[in-house]
Image (cartoon, rainbow, N blue to C red):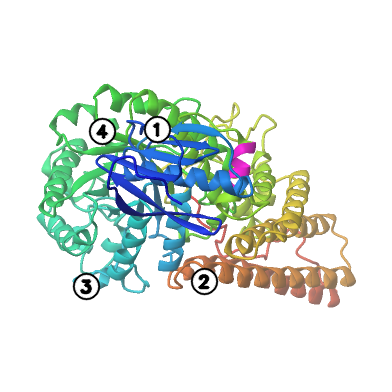
Amino acid sequence: MLGSPVYGSPEPLDFYIDLPGLMQPAYRQSETFFFQLGSVTPGAAPENSQGYTLRMEPQGIWIAAADAGGLRYGIDTLAQILAQAGGQGTCLEITDYPSLPNRGLMLDVSRGKVYTREYLMNLAKMLSRMRYNVLQLYMEHPFAFRKHPEIWEGSDPITPEDILALQDCCRSLGIELQANLQCLGHCRRILTRKEHMHLSESDMFWSLRTTSEESIALLDDLFGEYLPLFDSEWINICLDEPYDLGKGKSASSGKEPGELYVQFLKKVHDLAAKYGKKVMLFGDVILKHPEFLPQLPKDVRYIDWCYDPKPHYGTPAVFGKYHLDFWVSPGSGNWNTLFPRLDGCLTNVNNLLGEALEAHASGMLFTDWNDHGGYTQPGAGYYGYGYAAAVAWDGKPQDRAAVDGYLDRVLDSAGYSKVIRTLSQIYWLAPIWSKNRSECVMALFDEPIFGQAVCGPEPPKELKAYDLSLPEGVQPVLERHSQHPLRPYFSIPEDTCRQIQALAESARADAVNLPAGAVRDQLLYQTEAFLVMTRKLELSRKIRSRFAEKNLMIPELVLLEEDVRSLIQQYAHLQLDFIKVWVQIAKESEIYISLTYFAHILERLDYLRDWLSLQREALEAGKELSYDFSDYQTAGYGTLPTY
């Protein structure tokens, strides 16, 4: 039974811990939140926000905290201890509190998966167990704006009811749901609507025209519907990567891009204030123009983002120098890829958060993007979620073995971390890792005869995974539509393919034993995708090699046709698996982007099979084969976009 309250008559709270056979409430008295079981000697609450003291004695249990968040985390720790100890306690005392008070996740719902309400609410529960206390949904267009339905036309959007239900769920879990809406760049989906094309800065249809009052009027319409849904006082207006700022219609103003940016930021800041909100924004532009910082509103919160695995960043020190309110933003590395670039993510988290703490940052916003259709599976990225949360709480790099066990418990999925660790080894094989993308997914959808995975330059021996520098003599490339120099797309050697195959088969053998559910299905899809990719490259090399020898006979051509037919079947099954794992967690509307990639590779394989049959028919007629592939048409296809 609950012992006698220490502070007189306490106020019962909606906090409970489920002990064997007992559902015990928590209490508040004055400024102290506490939980007591038995007649244990009470202790003082720590002064640190979200901190707690947990004491376990033979006579009972006591948890004290200065706020509701701390009590929640103390109860969570107790539950973990009892679960690991089989319900039996031990004598101990723990005082714990976070290094960063704000620990948030920003999830992209705008460029691929528009996640279902059920998925988002389950995600919030997982995030709470990881001790996140902030959640943002990155929003470009898929919100059901009543006044501007043309913006989300063709999408199955997030609705006001979705936001309110998610907010209620987050509130019960101690998570602040913050508004997020792109307000400058990344507005292509809006600016390609005929109603708003005139608001585009340039023919890139990327950034809003900062010198147009109509741009602010449009944002006012959107803010008026969107912001009142959120209890949080914050909106992330993003304002990152305005590539064409000042290079189009605003150029006639005679003002430099930095000045245009500052003026527009002030207008959006004041517009948000109209709805009772304060703004946070990504700091990439202002870092290029720190001379404008004295002109900006003092209540702006900056987000210092970088997702590269750098040994040193330097940017947190800039924000710290000016005594600004700022968070840092590492990333999951789970975009433009089949599987997260995990070790790059962990390096990014360790080093960026380390510098953030030195520069007195007030938070972390861990980002999980969905570039080019969101074909990457989220489940494998949960490892990065958990690791980032642990570092943000503890303030230092984490022991990987401890994180493995912790995540298996959080996900209720023993063996999850082993599968993740196995597949992550693939990204240490040159040249699979690449800045902002991974060659595995490019190879999966690559043109089967002339794709870079088999025809590209050989990876230099000096090429290293998770190394931003390139060997001497190798230059970065700027691909079509890209604004960032990238590593060249190298070929993937046969030995590398064999190693990928072995790792994928090992991971699959473990993944089949995971608890049934979406995460298991996603990991099985990913292992099969790696295997299909290696089979495709093996067949591509086989066909090219046999044609180079110039001695093909009809039976062998028949067998090659059959090999391609079998590969088409494998891709079709992979596509069906992709659809299955998508609809488990996301609305269907945006799946067409990724299904287009499958359509492309299936068309190319079907063409290859037909081309081989034409070669066989030519040989049957006594004609020369096209051994140099001179009549093989690629129709300009290369691979899927990954810039």
Q: Which residue is mark 3?
A: 146
Q: Secondary structure at mark 4?
A: loop
Residue 271 vertical position relative to residue 525 in the rendered view, above or below: above
Q: Earlier in the sequence, mark 2 or mark 3?
A: 3
Instruction: Name the N-terminal-most of marks 1 and 2.
Output: 1
- Residue 131 visible at all: no
Q: Nearer the viewer, mark 1 or mark 2?
A: 1
**Residue segment shown in magenta:** 401-407
Which is nearer the eye, 169 or 506?
169
- Identify the residue shown where x is 71% and y is 74%: 610
Q: Quadrant of residue 529?
A: bottom right
Q: CA distance from mark 3 to mark 4?
A: 34 Å
Q: Looking at the image, do the residues carrying marks 4 and 2 touch, with CB atoms under 8 Å apart?
A: no
Q: Identify the residue position indicated by label 2 in the image.
A: 583
User: What amino acid is labelled 3 in the image?
Assistant: Arg
Q: Which residue is mark 4?
A: 325
Sequence-earlier tag: 1 or 3:
1
Amino acid type at image mark 1: Gly
Q: Residue at x 59, y 28 (%)?
A: 473
Quarter where residue 599 is shown? bottom right
Left or right of 567 on screen, residue 273: left
Residue 237 lies, in percent from the top left, at: 25, 49
Judge left or right: residue 632 versus residue 586. right
Label 1 belongs to which residue?
Answer: 43
Q: Secondary structure at mark 2?
A: helix
Instruction: Name the N-terminal-most of marks 3 and 4.
Output: 3
x and y percent of residue 73 in the render?
43, 44
Residue 292 at x, y = what percent?
A: 18, 30
User: What amino acid does circle 2 point to?
Assistant: Val
Nearer-N-terminus badge (4/2): 4
Secondary-structure class at tag 3? loop
